[in-house]
Image (cartoon, grey):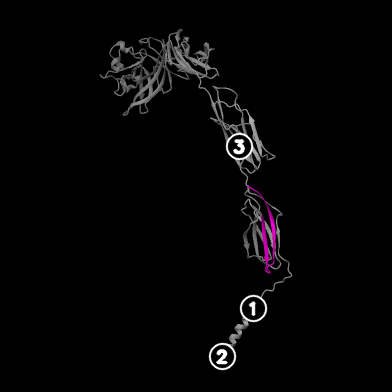
Amino acid sequence: MSNKIITLLIILITFGGVISCGDEREILDSSTREPDITFAFDVMKIDMNLIDNLPVVAIIRSELGLKNVLIQIKKTDNNIIDYKTFTEFFNENSFSYAEKINYSADYQSIIITATDKLDRSISETLPLNITEVKEAPSIIFNPSSILYDEIEGGEMPETNFTVQSVAGLKSLEMFLVAESGQTQYGFPIDFPDKENEYTFNQQIMYKEGDKGFRVKATDIYGQVKIATLPVQYLTPTPPVVTITEDTIYADKDQTKIIPLQITSQRGIAEIKIYRIEDGIENLVHTIVRDDKPLKLNLTPEVTCTNATSKIKIVVSDVVNKSSEALITAIVNMYFTAHLEIGTHPLANGYSGYPNVYSLLSLKDFKTYPVDYAVENEANASNVDLKFYAFGGQAVLRMYSIDGGTGTKSNEFRGSSGKSVLDMPIQNATKVLKLVDFDFDNATAESITRDIPLSNIVSNTINPFNVGDVLAFKTASTSTSGGDRVGIMKILDNKQVNPSNVTARVITVSIKFPK
């Protein structure tokens, strides 16, 4: 076959194919029904205060097949927004539309327009009923704060507040706020009818320490508003009682003058004076002041007994606020509040603590070195107890002067090498650790009455610790007199030589009936 014929055949085949493809066009039937649109709701209720509004749901059908679906939003100003257009469909005869829309308060309706392949269009409108965002409740106090001054007195202002809620109230709680925290006031209030307003008006009797009144309002959407009414409650300071001395010394049944200076912002109404004996308060004087002075100097007299441990003064003002002062009474006793005593490495002194030694005189309430004690009989009879610390744990011990090496006398040495063993007189003082004995309130009477001589028989206390109360009974050879009972409280214990753990200073307080 010639080349010309072959070329013509190719041209015929080519054009024949094009004509054949052009004949395979889709035939559209105009007798089919137009598209139809069905919404899931007649009216869509939208509450913008909620986060779980339902989606817009619609079914769009077309017998012929959908070409496009247009979603539009109509606003209250009649403007229409082209929201979204669909042109591709999994099933062109049926399209399901479901979408949660980010609503705005000015949206009026959703318009869906469906167009089929013959460009036939139909539109349906879904009205929107939108509830706009509601503000949280408001709480208004009137007055906006409360100030009450006890000095001025008068009626307590009423607490008044109004709660308003556009959405409607669900519940309300009230609290009293004080320095110690907040406590609920009354019971929570529920609002089953979703009231939009609630008013409270009541006289709340605020007191010292109150700081405010707090209200918590919750609306039907769970929005919470908390507001606090500031409360200032001013109270005069209680009377101020000034004493010139916190400790008085007296003999048995001696009458002592107690100088007092008293001031009060509201006026002094009454002064009561008590004598405390064996822990019991006995009223000895009541002074009533009808003139209600703001300042007063007094010198009342109080007779101190052998059982008196303290004098108590109570001052009350015209609004019954009171203050008290306590005076320690040392009656018919020798007393030292703080006395430092060294352990055996300080038997003859230590440079860091001058005048602190390990031998205690109960006559002088003073410590002495071994050099003093071994000098003569008078000096030797003037020391009654020695203090010791044992081993690496520095266990505290107390010994009488006598007892030989059994009470470590050989370890208490002076500058010449002499020890307590060389003292010409060695007092046989006896000691006892007491249990649950009240040192601070102990009196000459309670010491004599509650600590029998027959119970104090040991020459050793091993161990003793800070806080312990110890009793002692003097030896017949002591310069303080024989068979006399006193007590001692251990206040402190400290190491004073860094290179020697047993070099310690013990601080004690002593009461010794005369």
Residue at position x 70%, y 53% in the image? 43
Q: Does 203 appear above or below 127?
A: above
Tag 3 residue? 139
Q: Nearer the viewer, mark 1 or mark 3?
A: 3
Residue 188 position, x and y percent, is 64, 35
Q: Residues within 10 Å of mark 3 (few under 14, many from 20)?
A: many
Kindly state the secondary structure of the residue where label 1 is placed: helix
What label does residue 22 carry, if any?
Answer: 1
Q: x and y percent of residue 413 in the render? A: 29, 20
Instruction: Give, as a three-letter code, the residue at label 2.
Output: Lys
Q: Main secondary structure of the magenta part?
A: strand
- Estimate the x, y position of residue 68 in percent, counting from the top left: 65, 65
Which residue type does callout 3 highlight? Ile
Closer to the camera in the image, 440 or 379: 440
How far, Cα to Cα, is label 3 from label 2? 101 Å
Q: Earlier in the sequence, mark 3 or mark 2?
A: 2
Q: Secondary structure at mark 2?
A: helix
The image quadrant where one finds the C terminus is top left
Q: Is residue 352 visible?
A: yes
**Residue 412 figure quarter:** top left
Q: Which residues are the magenta region?
A: 109-132
The residue at which mark 2 appears reads as 4
Disc 2: CA contacts within 10 A as few (<14), some (14-19) or many (>=20) = few
| Magenta-span inclusion, residue 230 | no
Q: Position of residue 195 (x, y in %)?
A: 68, 39
Q: Is residue 105 above or below residue 218?
A: below
Q: Is residue 441 visible?
A: no
- Identity, as a three-letter code, of the amino acid under mark 1: Gly
